[in-house]
């Protein structure tokens, strides 16, 4: 029960103290006015009283890593607009207090986030996010399901947060957590706080979640388990598009065929399911191979194209085949943009005009200004945290005095494009991605081993500070003022 790895593996399964200031009330009213609109975006905002709030943003199923969003007074940004034509997801939490939440947002949703203090034991309080989507038909209880269940789990000691050693001392009683979820769903349904669809969907997902936990324990402890006792229908075609059900099938495969193996590469599981007789029906097999192919893309990318061809030959599911055909075409285009033969080592290119420049050219065209160069990447959490603060810093100086250059070292072109859109950098001419980063003279000349990293150049193009302070540090502002 105290196994930390099990806690991490279970994360994905999981009215308020609102001091309504005049500004926040106005914000809600504005969001409600947009109720009938279905814009190709999702708007996310935090209350002005929140100092800092972090969450992970999942824009599509092929993301290897989530986009990271920081909002709040401390972060110099209280809202963000996410362009999308599909639903997106946010996931986050607080490991110290065993808080984990996830929320699906539909195209056109406007999400307003507040926080509420909860007592998790005699001496500790935790801040839990409270969500409001004024232009959604979902009820408050549906949107804040994770919060309601967490409160019940704390109250019934299904989750116990240790006073001192929060990792080794805290405990989670998964059987009680499952029981709590079912009784809570029944009680909310009885008072019409949730819809029939939410009730039935969440109920099967909670059941699947507990089955997944049981399978993981049996697999990790190498113990015999009566699969029928899980009371889950194998090869239920109505559930094949349910991610929690696919996870159940994957855990069942691991338990039945790879119980004694600690780590098994997704390509090995793909080949096994493809070539061997198993408990899977043909439809289940294809959806499971689809899931393994996604894992190959994120964990064994050098094998991806080979297995994508295999999958295309195997599947007779047109929707799965078409999905991968579109993705592979985009994947090849994006890869070529970073690996084209005419894009030599260290070349910078942007999204505005696709110009190909050397770093020296960029410096030269900005001669006469102070130039601050920011090295970042979509996957770099501290980099993303600094970006809104960097924009705030830039606004303090005249364009004739200070030029900010953004250089991404991303190896995934699509990830850079996505992050650039979220950070409002896609229309900036001086926001670049660099090719063959580790082999570039820029990397070697300035010994850039970690990011975020900032270089500050004077009006004459000569380096002032090869390891300048971060935008969040007042020293950077003072250094720029002293250099103008």
Image (cartoon, rainbow, N blue to C red):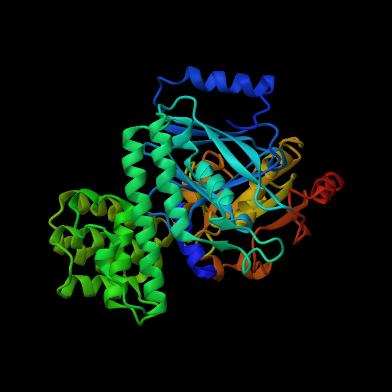
In the rendered image, the vertical position of residue 464 relative to residue 388, given as above or below? below
Residue at x 31% of width, y 41% of height: 200
Is residue 380 at least partly visible in the picture? no
In the rendered image, the vertical position of residue 296 relative to residue 147, given as above or below? below
Residue 358 x/y as whole percent: 57, 57
Residue at x 43% of width, y 35% of height: 188
In the rendered image, the vertical position of residue 145 relative to residue 283, given as above or below? above
Residue 11 relative to residue 365: left or right: left
Q: Quadrant of the C terminus?
A: top right
Residue at x 39% of width, y 26% of height: 38
* Closer-to-camera residue (356/49): 49
Residue 99 x/y as whole percent: 57, 52
In the rendered image, the vertical position of residue 324 relative to residue 421, given as above or below? below
Residue farthest right in this picture = 482
Is residue 148 at least partly visible in the picture? yes
Residue 348 x/y as whole percent: 53, 55
Residue 150 relative to residue 335: left or right: right
* Closer-to-camera residue (41/352): 41
Residue at x 68% of width, y 31% of height: 48
Residue 247 x/y as whole percent: 33, 60
Residue farthest bottom in this picture = 260
Number of marks in picture:
0
**Residue 187, quarter of the rendered image:** top left
């Amino acid at each position: 029960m105290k196994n930390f790895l099990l806690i991490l593996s279970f994360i994905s399964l999981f009215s308020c103290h609102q001091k309504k200031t005049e500004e926040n009330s106005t914000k809600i009213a504005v969001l409600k006015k947009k109720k009938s609109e279905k814009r190709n975006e999702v708007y996310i905002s935090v209350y002005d009283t929140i100092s800092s709030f972090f969450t992970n943003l999942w824009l599509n199923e092929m993301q290897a890593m989530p986009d990271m969003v920081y909002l709040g007074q401390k972060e110099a940004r209280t809202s963000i607009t996410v362009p999308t034509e599909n639903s997106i997801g946010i996931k986050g939490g607080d490991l110290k207090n065993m808080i984990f939440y996830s929320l699906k947002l539909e195209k056109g949703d406007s999400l307003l986030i507040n926080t509420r203090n909860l007592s998790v034991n005699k001496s500790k309080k935790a801040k839990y996010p409270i969500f409001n989507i004024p232009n959604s038909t979902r009820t408050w209880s549906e949107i804040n399901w994770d919060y309601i269940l967490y409160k019940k789990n704390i109250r019934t000691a299904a989750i116990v947060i240790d006073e001192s050693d929060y990792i080794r001392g805290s405990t989670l009683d998964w059987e009680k957590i499952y029981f709590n979820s079912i009784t809570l769903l029944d009680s909310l349904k009885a008072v019409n706080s949730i819809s029939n669809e939410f009730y039935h969907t969440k109920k099967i997902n909670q059941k699947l979640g507990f089955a997944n936990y049981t399978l993981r324990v049996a697999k990790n402890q190498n113990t015999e388990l009566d699969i029928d006792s899980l009371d889950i229908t194998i090869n239920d075609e109505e559930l094949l598009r349910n991610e929690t059900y696919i996870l159940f099938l994957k855990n069942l495969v691991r338990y039945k065929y790879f119980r004694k193996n600690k780590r098994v590469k997704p390509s090995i599981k793909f080949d096994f399911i493809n070539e061997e007789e198993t408990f899977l029906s043909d439809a289940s097999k294809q959806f499971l191979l689809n899931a393994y192919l996604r894992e190959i893309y994120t964990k064994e990318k050098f094998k991806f194209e080979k297995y994508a061809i295999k999958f295309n030959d195997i599947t007779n599911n047109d929707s799965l085949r078409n999905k991968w055909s579109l993705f592979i075409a985009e994947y090849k285009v994006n890869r070529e943009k970073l690996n084209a033969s005419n894009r030599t080592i260290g070349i910078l290119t942007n999204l505005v005009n696709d110009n190909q420049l050397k770093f020296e050219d960029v410096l030269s065209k900005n001669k006469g200004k102070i130039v601050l160069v920011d090295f970042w990447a979509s996957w770099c959490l501290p980099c993303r945290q600094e970006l809104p603060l960097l924009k705030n810093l830039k606004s303090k100086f005249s364009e004739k005095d200070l030029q900010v250059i953004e250089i991404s070292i991303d190896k995934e072109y699509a990830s850079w494009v996505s992050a650039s859109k979220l950070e409002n950098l896609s229309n900036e001419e001086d926001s670049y991605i660099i090719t063959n980063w580790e082999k570039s003279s820029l990397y070697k000349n300035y010994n850039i081993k970690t990011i975020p990293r900032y270089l500050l150049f004077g009006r004459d193009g000569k380096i002032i500070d090869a390891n300048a302070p971060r935008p969040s540090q007042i020293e950077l502002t003072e250094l720029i003022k002293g250099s103008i």
